[in-house]
Image (spheres, helix red, strand yellow):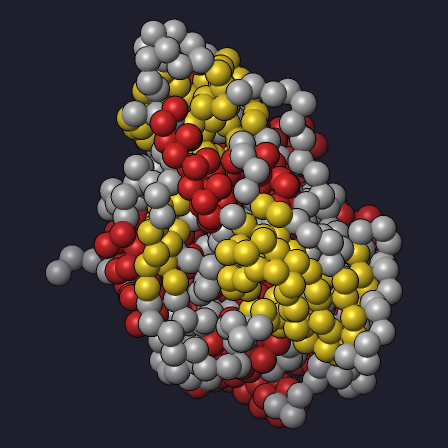
Amino acid sequence: MRKLPILRSPRGRAAALAAVLAALTVCAGDAVARSYPFGTHTRSVNDLGNQFVPFHARLWDLLHGSADGGLLLNWQSGFGTGFLPDFGTYLSSPFALLVGVFPRDRIDLAVYAVTLVKTGAAAAAMTWLLTALRRGRGREWAAVVLGASYALCGWSVIEAVYNPMWLDGLIAFPLLCLAAEWARTGRRPVLGTLLVTLAWVSNFYTAYMATLGAALVLVVRLLTEDGTRRERVRGLGRAVRTVALGAGLAAPVLVPVYLGTRHAYPGWTRPFAPAAWPDVAARLLPATYGFFSPALFLGTGALLLAGALAFHRAVPRTERLVWAGLVAGVALSLQWGPTHLLWHAFATPNGSPYRQTFVLSGLLVIAAWLSVASGWPDRRALLGGAGVVALIAAGAASSALVTAWTYPLFAAGLAAVAGALVLARRGRYAVLAALLLVGAQAGQAAATTAYADRQRLGRLDDYAPWGERQRLQAAAVAEADGWPRYRTDPGLEQSTANDPLLTGGQGGAYYSSHTPDVLTRTFLALGAGWTSNGRALHDLDSPVTDAVFSVGARVHMPRDPHQGWNRPDDRPVTVSHEDVPPLVTVRTANEHLKYGRSPFRNQEKLLGASVYTVPATSLRAADGSGAADAGAYDYAVRPGTYTLRAACPVGSEVYLWAPDLFGRARLGASEQADFRGELPGRRAELRKLGDGGGALAVSMRVARPGTVPHEAVGCLDRDRLTRAVAGLKRTGATRVTVTGSGVRAALPPGTRGLAVLAAPRIAGWSCGGRPADSYLGLVAAPVSGDRPVLDCSYRPPGLRRGSLVGAGALLGLVAVGLTGRRRRAAP
């Protein structure tokens, strides 16, 4: 069997070994923690289970031709949303395509495999970069350990491991540094540009940070390497051109992603607060965890060598001072507000405020390699490096993040690394030295991985991997599916906030950084629940909204214990069916319609018929005292028991709207309904309490302080709803065709009025060649004539502009390539 060309060189073999070492170390740590797939503990915490696994499931569907919609339009989530911004944010990495080779019911394993491959690729890329910056002949095995230490840094195994698209930034930093090095020396202009494009397409967010880091490395290289002033200026110019053309080629994805964030509902806003310096020092050590401090762990080997650089006399003095200054400056920039904003594109993130940490880790690894590549550090350099490491360890002593395992692992690693470096200087003990370095790095990284696995489960929300629950839910959806005649909703009893992507159907639930503002505000008006301050929308479970959005089948599941429900739920999986209008209906144009405060009245406006009675209410505590008002529209409630009284017409279905209620409510002997509101971050959805009429008493058990609206009760008249649905069916579309980029509907002859598509009017919709109208947040367009047709298409905002920029960048790249070829051909 012939070797791959890249494995024929020592550099190629070193990169491959680093990749294997990094991937195996992550597996070892997960196995110690008994984390999926090596044990019973789920690894799907936070957004990994709630967002990224479901989005990868949709990618699987797209690759296998089984998705509702396409790359531009997603018919499965939020009753129809744009997909290109989500694709560019979560799925555009080439590594994501690996999910297509796994069975769909092993999607969690597929995402884990993608994570391992990305980690290995980051190790290989850094190893290749190190040996490109300085060959270090005979010491390539040290580059293996350092490349792996970069891929196994704390930021990677603690934070990016459950944000897999961030790992593309871990790969991008060494690749962009390599492209910058080629630009400095005037080599490989086309390949360098394509590396920039790859980085920015894979994940624009971390690519931005990686580009800043690579620019700093380039500046240092220009200052410390030989060359005239003119050569340095030309090298800098070539680097700017490389980034401009590379980002330009990525514009067809980048511009829609950027505009997707502009049209998204605002998320959390959190002011930046720098971490305490003892905590920063602690995060450089193994087996520590913290959400609001930088995960700087690298392993004692890389840390010792980086510290030794400033004392290593075999390295030119200018180079030592400049690299030490760069590392110190970047470390300080993590803690200062203005530079914090610069690193994060001038917007403080909602979660961890140290997402640029991987750049500092990469700079430390480069400094460590320069310390080795110029010759093994002597005793003076090792003592100096050990002193730096000792100061870090001492500075971390007062931090509460230090655990019982931190200092023992640190001391063992320091002894192993020091011994390895002493042995490496003697030459004949190189193999033993390599084993000590590898063992120290792998042992500390695996322990840190295992510790982080357990800590995340205790501190973050978690979600079960694909199992029997998801199989039953997906089977029920598939059996009931009637798209596009009607929608099938996977149900309010969700496993994740993206169940329609994970288990199929065409539901209202949707969670993304690009959740459209118009979608959230429409759902807000209709009484939907949410989490993540409005970015994660829950399903609308009401017969009125089902009629509006053509939800003809709805799956009902037992509550998922991974969603925090402590009470066992042994209800069977069932599917309910409703007679609903088609996706396209016709209304009378009314420019004065606007949503009000009551979701019951708002649902009526969207339906076009009066179907609710909204009675006056009174709310009293257990001692008989009346609840105080919180403003003009709400009662104030505190933990305790209350009774809400109202009167409904006989034969009504009774609904309760209490978006800020965290507790339980029950109508008579009906089943208890759970509410999880805590505005503004969490909003409880409008819920059915049961059937009733006359005087009603709703018992409420409140767990947290909140509010209950004065108009909290809605009494639905099913007969009136049936008549309204019949009217919409009579005038609705006779045939509807949907594609991955639009809708075409044929309407009854002679139809005049406003055709309304049961989909949110997000930016990008056009009907009949002009921007679509909005009917209370839904897509609409006027129709008339003997054969009226609604023909609407969707194009993500920015796609045309991005494509034009990309075409221009492609022409520029071709010009660069031809120019380079002519120069090489010239005598």
Q: Quadrant of residue 184?
A: top right
Which quadrant is home to the N terminus?
bottom left
Q: Residue at x 86, y 65 (%)?
A: 628
The answer to whether residue 219 is above or below residue 337 is above
Nearer to us in this view, 815 or 613: 613
Residue 89: percent from the left, percent from the top? 51, 45
Q: Quadrant of residue 104?
A: bottom left
191 relative position to 519: left or right? left
The answer to whether residue 357 is above or below residue 264 is below
Q: Residue at x 50, y 81 (%)?
A: 567
Residue 23: percent from the left, percent from the top? 40, 69
From this viewpoint, which residue is outermost toward the left?
1
Q: Quadrant of residue 568?
A: bottom left
Residue 563: percent from the left, percent from the top? 51, 71
38 relative position to 284: left or right? left
Q: Residue at x 65, y 68 (%)?
A: 698
The answer to whether residue 415 is above or below residue 378 is below
Which quadrant is home to the C terminus?
top left
Nearer to us in this view, 768 or 512: 768
Nearer to us in this view, 305 or 56: 56
743 relative position to 351: left or right? left
Whether residue 823 is visible to the viewer of this picture, yes or no, is: no
Residue 292: percent from the left, percent from the top? 72, 67
